[in-house]
Amino acid sequence: MEDKQLNEKESLELITQMIRNTQKKMEKGSGIPFLIWGYVTIAVSLTVWYLLGKTGNQNWNFLWFAIPVIGFPVMLLALKRKTTLPKTYIDKVISYVWIVMGVSALIPSMAAAVIHNFPVLFLVVLLISAGTAMTGLVIKFKPLVISGFGGMLLSILCLILRESLDSILVFAALFLLVQVIPGHILNYKNRKNHV
Amino acid sequence: MFKELDPLLHSELRLAVMSILLSVDEADFVYLKEQTKATSGNLSVQIDKLNEAGYIEVERGFAGKRTRTVCKITPVGVKAFEDYVESLKSYLKL
């Protein structure tokens, strides 16, 4: 493309073509944040479940804070590997959704440290599932919508089982459903679109 | 009566850059180069012209060890683009 003058019709065609090309782009590896948070949460959950079951010492619950401690640096590292793809308004909306959801999930986690028997796992799964469903609706990606709403519904299991240690296993399984599985599907789909 | 077409936008490469930037929040120089298939030198010159006119913002930074230039359309640029499209419509009697 050069610095040449166009006629009016060519100008309009060029505008349409450029906008259409840009809208077609889908970020390769956009499932990565789902996979990072999903796998970190599952690993920490299983560790807490094992240690609580083995020792009965409630102080192991402080290990839950390993999720943001591990998750944030890994996310920063992953985001550093910038692509040259443009940042769309949709990307912006999605990052705002997850900032709000992330902060909302941190608050019940802090409350659980001081309030006995607080239904933290239920609230966290409900919020994260809502984030997944919203992301799916924004990018029009059905697997995210289905797993997000499914997670919201199944989060009740964590509430029912909150007296039992098994609620942690249900929590880990739900993270597999609302983060890991859709993350892999999203990556697979994007890889296919880029071939 | 026909509205005058903005000479800054009535050029293939600058119009392409503005069209891309209108549909995204921000775009990388490398991406613009890929999409427009322009040479780096020519694209740089046109980006500077749009920047000087206040139609776009250009941010030069680093991504790891490599330099990274990110462009973003400004409200002035959006208005100019809208006026340009309105003028095109009057020429094409749309």
Image (spheres, rainbow, N blue to C red):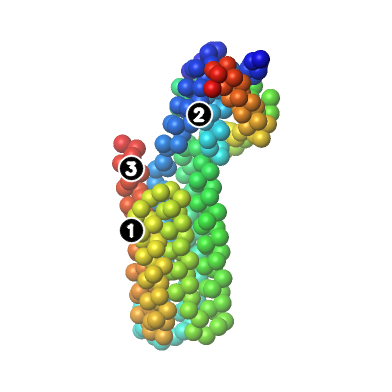
Image coords of residue A67 (percent x, y): 47, 66
The CA span between labels 2 and 1 is 34 Å
The CA span between labels 3 and 1 is 15 Å
Q: Do the residues under discs 3 and 1 have CB atoms within 8 angstroms?
A: no
Q: Which comes before the other along the chain, label 3 or label 1? A: 1
Q: Amino acid at mark 2?
A: Leu
Work out which quarter of the rendered image holds the C terminus of chain A and state it: top left
**Label 3 is found on which chain of the structure?**
A
Secondary structure at badge 3 equals: helix
**Label 1 is found on which chain of the structure?**
A
Residue B79 higher or lower than B9, as above or below: below
Q: Is residue B76 left or right of residue B43?
A: right
Secondary structure at badge 2 equals: helix
Mark 3 closeness class: few <14, some 14–19, many ≥20 residues within 10 Å = some
Image coords of residue A187 (percent x, y): 35, 48
Q: Is residue A92 visible?
A: yes
**Label 2 is found on which chain of the structure?**
B
Residue of label 2 = B32
Q: Is residue A53 left or right of residue A62?
A: left
Residue of label 1 = A181
* Label disc, if present, on residue A191 of the rendered structure: 3
Image coords of residue B30 (percent x, y): 49, 30
Residue B88 higher or lower than A100, as above or below: above
Count numbered badges in the picture: 3
Residue A174 higher or lower than B12, as above or below: below
* Residue at the spot 53% in from the left edge and 13% down from the top edge: A7
Q: Do the residues under discs 2 and 1 have CB atoms within 8 angstroms?
A: no
Q: Amino acid at mark 3?
A: Arg
Image coords of residue A19 (percent x, y): 48, 31
